[in-house]
Amino acid sequence: MRGRKVTPKVRDGKVQKKNRHQWTEFQELLDQETFSTIKMKPQEGYIHVVDRKSALKFVKLIPDWEDMSKGLSALVPDIDGCNHQTDMNYYPNSYNSIWLSPFPKDMTLYWPKEFGEGHKEVTDLLGIEQEEIDDEEIKTVWTKPKAQAWQLLHLFLYDLYCHHECMLQGKDNYHHSDKLAEEYAIKTSAIILPDYEKVVGRFY
């Protein structure tokens, strides 16, 4: 499984890192002891695929949740849409929260070919076909349940590992490992999967 540090092609705009350190109005709300979800209205042309009820059900399936989630304030479906859904969304200035980008309404993602090859195990599991556009880019088409499964079973677990490492290392010294975060996401999703459909919902 290859790491996620990629530079994807972006359509309709330039990808930029979140400037969350300026959102001081969220500080008190996010830095709380009880894990919660905070929904933000997505930008035009995008939708949220993870809802509060599903997220709270999902975290109960994570076997080491109590340890991994120490210091984690919230899951935040973000404002800014993303048409590749590959970026790491946990940063030391994320208010101890995991942020998930809205999906494009047409449910189509464009990935660098290398990223697609490195995540074929996951897309095969979710029943997603990878269509090669050229030598560098592939296209994947999703349904909302499959998109939710991708964000929870892979992106959320990846970022949960990053959060845990940040808590151990301290924000000033934080440096995440793509390889270890990927391994944690794959290993934990395999444990969760048998109960995922019964608890969260079917994705096919």
Image (tube, rainbow, N blue to C red):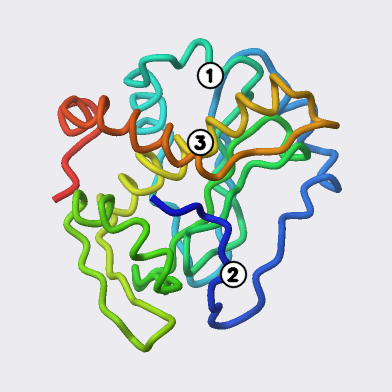
Look at the picture and state if 140 lies above or below 93: below
Q: Residue at x 51, y 55 (%)?
A: 4
Does the residue at mark 3 contact the one at mark 2 (Cβ under 8 Å)? no
Q: Can you name the residue that lies furthest to the bottom here?
A: 134
Look at the picture and state if 166 lies above or below 49: above
Crowd band around label 3 with a 10 angstrom C-alpha radius: few (<14), some (14–19), many (20+): some
Residue depth check, mark 1 versus mark 3: number of the one nearer the observer: 3
Locate residue 49 relative to residue 193 in the image: left or right.
right
Tell which circle, 2 or 1, labels the residue nearer the N-terminal end: 2
Marks 1 and 3, how far apart in space? 14 Å
Residue depth check, mark 3 versus mark 2: number of the one nearer the observer: 3
Task: Give the percent coordinates (x, y) of residue 134.
Answer: 37, 88
The amino acid at mark 3 is Leu
User: Mark 1 highlights which residue?
Assistant: 68
Task: Give the percent coordinates (x, y) of residue 192.
Answer: 26, 27
Q: Which of 27 and 97 lies nearest the eye of the viewer?
A: 97
Q: Which of 199 and 45 lies nearest the eye of the viewer?
A: 199
User: Mark 3 highlights which residue?
Assistant: 180
User: Mark 2 highlights which residue?
Assistant: 7
The amino acid at mark 1 is Met
Q: Which of 64 and 182 lies nearest the eye of the viewer?
A: 182
Crowd band around label 1 with a 10 angstrom C-alpha radius: few (<14), some (14–19), many (20+): some
Locate residue 60 relative to residue 128 in the image: left or right.
right
Look at the picture and state if 104 lies above or below 57: below
Locate residue 167 relative to residue 133 in the image: left or right.
right
Task: Give the percent coordinates (x, y) of residue 74.
Answer: 59, 29
